[in-house]
Image: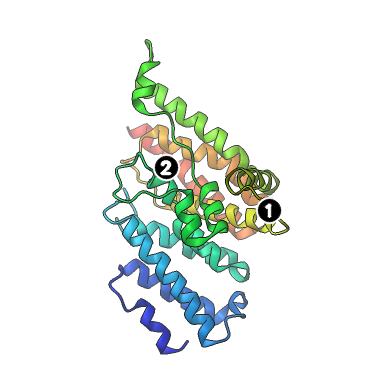
Amino acid sequence: MDDSINIFWKNDFSEYWESFIDFLQDSIKSWTTFSTLQTHRDLEFFFKIIFEVCKRTERNFEGKQRLTGEYKEYHSHLYEVARLYLEYSWENATLEWIIIALRHDDIEDLHKDSKSKIKVNFIDILQEDWYKPAIGVEMLTKPKVPHIDETRLHLGNQDLHSVREKQKIERDDKYYEAFLNIDTLTEELSNIADAKLWIKLKSDKKQLARDIAIVRIVDRIHNLRTMPEKEYSNEKRLRKLKNTEVYLLHLAQSLKMPRLYGDLVSSVIYWYTRYFKVKKNS
């Protein structure tokens, strides 16, 4: 790659960003995915887009922390999901889906009711990165459970903690129903496009659904690999394991990507073992 392209990462970014860019640079050298990026101008455009998205990622999640993992800053997770997407997608990776992997938590974590300084919604992503990233991030966004004040109004004699946990389980089950297999995901993708864009997706919707599935699964793989033993409650840990087992394992199997499926299975088995040990000692 021309040294002149390096100007795009000679900026004050985090160490996670530099690692991701190094991985991306190596990918372009070796993968047929990027065989169309033959000219200096094509490469410059590609890295300029990635540069801008990474800059927004670090700005949007500035100060937000993860509970565990090698690094504490939240954007380290976003870079790792993008790296895993590239690793598993191999020659089918695209620029748009690198963007979606980097932005997959934007709407869910930076919504209008959150404490984040910067708020992001579907329209923001549509304006900044166009319709595929906007639809992709929308589909990767779990809906919020009712506000805690609203929940308190309907408590009666019930315990707040158990009611909130039930609401989260019901939310997860409803959300992950669309992720049962590639066909259910394709149907949900069409529904969201109709509602959000007022357009009918054409022949690429099956591939869009496939990429959404990969990002959803690699996000879960990284979350399971870095899931904390103490900071998460047993209920939260078990809830993640159950919806992975019931929905995402089936989805991964339907993709016919043995390595992706195998890595997800390994993460689930590991954490079921750890869960029962943690629960026994708690």
- Closer to the chain start, of discs 2 and 1, is 1
Residue 213 spot, x, y in % from top left: 59, 52
Q: Secondary structure at mark 2?
A: helix
Q: Residues within 10 Å of mark 2 (few under 14, many from 20)?
A: few
Q: Residue at x 51, y 87 (%)?
A: 40
Please identify the quadrant where the C terminus is shown. top left
Pick the residue in front: 189 or 260: 189
Displayed quadrant of residue 61: bottom left
Residue extending farthest top = 157
Question: Between tags 2 and 1, which lies in front?
Answer: 1
How far is mark 2 from mark 1, CA to CA? 43 Å
Q: Residue tagged by mark 2?
A: 274
Q: Residue tagged by mark 1?
A: 201
Residue type at numbered disc 2: Arg
Pick the residue in front: 185 or 48: 48
Residue type at numbered disc 1: Leu
Regarding residue 263, the answer to whether it shows in the image is yes
Q: Secondary structure at mark 1?
A: loop
